[in-house]
Amino acid sequence: MMEIETFLRDSGGKFMQFDACTARPADADYVEGAVRIAIHGVEIIGISEWDYVDQLWAYVASMVPQLSAAGYTSTYFPDQPVELSFRRQGSQVLVSAKLGNGVKKASVSTSDFVAALRSAGAAFFGKMSELLPENADSYSESRRELLS
């Protein structure tokens, strides 16, 4: 089982599921929020690792074609010392996050994981294009990369 959710952080510090948000973020350049990835009950990343969520999704979007081409990809969060990596192992992908002194990891079907990332990411970029139309071009570019 796998869950991928996105949250936006409001000006009061509260996290809301992004699809329920109707107000534009306060700062179009620094959209605070979190991506939650849980695999088989193991939360790899979540609200505790909140950051600039649109930048994080752009980084994750670029990881999908890299995973396909090279079998391994990693990125650091935009403004936190968190490293997220995907490593293909046969038909599975090992998803891991290095957080401080610890590592969280779990394996899942590569095809299921990529499909879930594409679905969640495409929904995120679509909604963000509505909330922040001035950023729509960069969101569309990240969406294209994610779906390629």
Image (cartoon, rainbow, N blue to C red):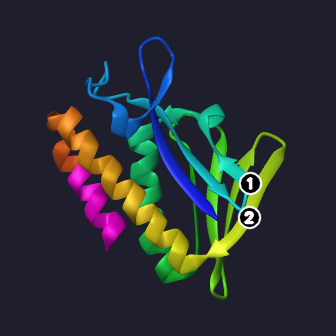
Seen in the picture, residue 70 relative to 9 is either above or below; the reply is below
Q: Looking at this rendering, what residue extends furthest in the bottom direction?
A: 90
Amino acid type assigned to the residue bearing label 1 in the image: Val
Image x and y of residue 88, in percent: 63, 79
Residue 21 lies, in percent from the top left, at 33, 30
In whole angstroms, how far apart are the C-alphas of marks 1 and 2? 7 Å
Question: What secondary structure prevails in the magenta region?
Answer: helix
* Sequence-earlier tag: 1 or 2: 1
Q: Which residue is mark 2?
A: 106
Callout 1: 10 Å neighbours few (<14), some, many (20+)?
Answer: some
Q: Residue at x 47, y 56 (%)?
A: 60
* Side of 45 relative to 101 (left or right): left
Q: Which residues are magenta?
A: 139-148
Residue at 62% in and 41% down: 46
Q: Which mark is on residue 42?
A: 1
Element at label 2: strand
Quadrant of residue 141 in the image? bottom left
The relative height of residue 17 versus residue 25 in the rendered view (above or below) is below
Residue 144 inside the magenta-drawn segment: yes
The answer to whether mark 1 and mark 2 are in CB contact below 8 A is yes
Residue 128 has which mark?
none
Q: Quadrant of the C terminus?
A: bottom left
Name which residue type carries label 2.
Answer: Ala
Against 144, residue 136 (above or below) is above
Q: Is residue 110 above or below residue 137?
A: below
Q: Is residue 92 left or right of residue 62?
A: right
Q: Nearer the viewer, residue 3 or 66?
A: 3
Q: Residue at x 55, y 43 (%)?
A: 77
